Image (cartoon, rainbow, N blue to C red):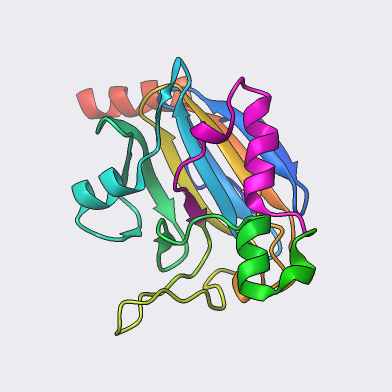
Amino acid sequence: MGEPLVAGRIVLDEIVPARAPWSGVVRAGHVLTIVDVGGNQAGDCLMFNLHDTDERYSAPDTITWSGNVYVDTGTVLRSNIGNPLMTVVGNEVDRQDTIGGACSKESNSLRYGHHTVHEHACRENFLAEASRHGMGPRDLVSNLNWFMNVPIEADGTLGIVDGMSGPGRRVAVRAEMDVLVLVSNCPQVNNPCNDFNPTPLRMVVTAPDPDRERAATGAARA
């Protein structure tokens, strides 16, 4: 199902079932690799300063500082006060989305018809997972969408189209501070963001390997 993109000691390795929420702590210097197990599965993502959740991921700050509406290797994911939360250190798809937002029961019913209002959505996943950490609706902000393809059309409109990912494709982000990461393994079945078939994601957190670091330091000194 894909190994971590960045070598290190594995400290967490979990499967997120289709349609389910997930959260985990990524310590400063550790790397979270997200694996698209089945292919073309969107993973909606929010990030918070573990020690002060009023500081959280900011799409506008990330876009402004990077000068790009898409996220790729090297993009620094910024907080609402401009601090680096995480940095993308590996990416196996053409681009990652941070403008498409999250689906909700309300948006589903507006876009696809009232008959969809009962369907589970990312906002509900985020609310359920945020409540485990003492957070609520006010803490949900515009999110990242790993593996989701949201092109900007010539007239400025956004598209939600077939993904550019595939089974086993990965993205890796390094924590620049202790970070709480929330993920909704998107349950959307009304548009092609999940290929109309939600599948699992895998979350792997790696810590720097001290032996590897010592060897590299020794080789550099030699």
The structure residue drawn at horizontal position 60% and vertical position 69%, both measured from the top left corner, is 193
Front residue of this view, candidates 142 and 175: 142
In the orientation shown, which residue stands out farthest toward the top? 51
Question: Picture coordinates of residue 65 (x, y %)?
Answer: 20, 46
Is residue 202 shown above or below 93? above
How many labels were placed on the picture? 0
Which residues lie in the magenta part? Answer: 119-145
Q: Quadrant of the C terminus?
A: top left
Question: Picture coordinates of residue 178 (x, y %)?
Answer: 44, 21
The structure residue drawn at horizontal position 27% and vertical position 52%, both measured from the top left corner, is 63
Front residue of this view, candidates 71 and 207: 71
The quadrant holding residue 191 is bottom right
The structure residue drawn at horizontal position 33% and vertical position 34%, both measured from the top left corner, is 79
Question: Picture coordinates of residue 131 (x, y %)?
Answer: 66, 27
Direction from residue 63 to residue 38 in the image, left or right:
right
Question: Picture coordinates of residue 173 (x, y %)?
Answer: 44, 42
Direction from residue 139 to residue 167 in the image, left or right:
right
Q: Is residue 61 visible?
A: yes
Q: Is residue 134 magenta?
A: yes
Front residue of this view, candidates 91 and 214: 91
Is residue 210 shown above or below 152? above
Q: Quadrant of the N terminus?
A: bottom right
Q: Is residue 39 visible?
A: no
The structure residue drawn at horizontal position 44% and vertical position 48%, both measured from the top left corner, is 142
Q: Is residue 163 magenta?
A: no
Is residue 168 shown above or below 58? below
Front residue of this view, candidates 165 and 146: 146
Direction from residue 202 to residue 220 in the image, left or right:
left
Direction from residue 111 to residue 31 in the image, left or right:
left
The quadrant holding residue 126 is top right
Is residue 79 shown above or below 209? below
The quadrant holding residue 77 is top left
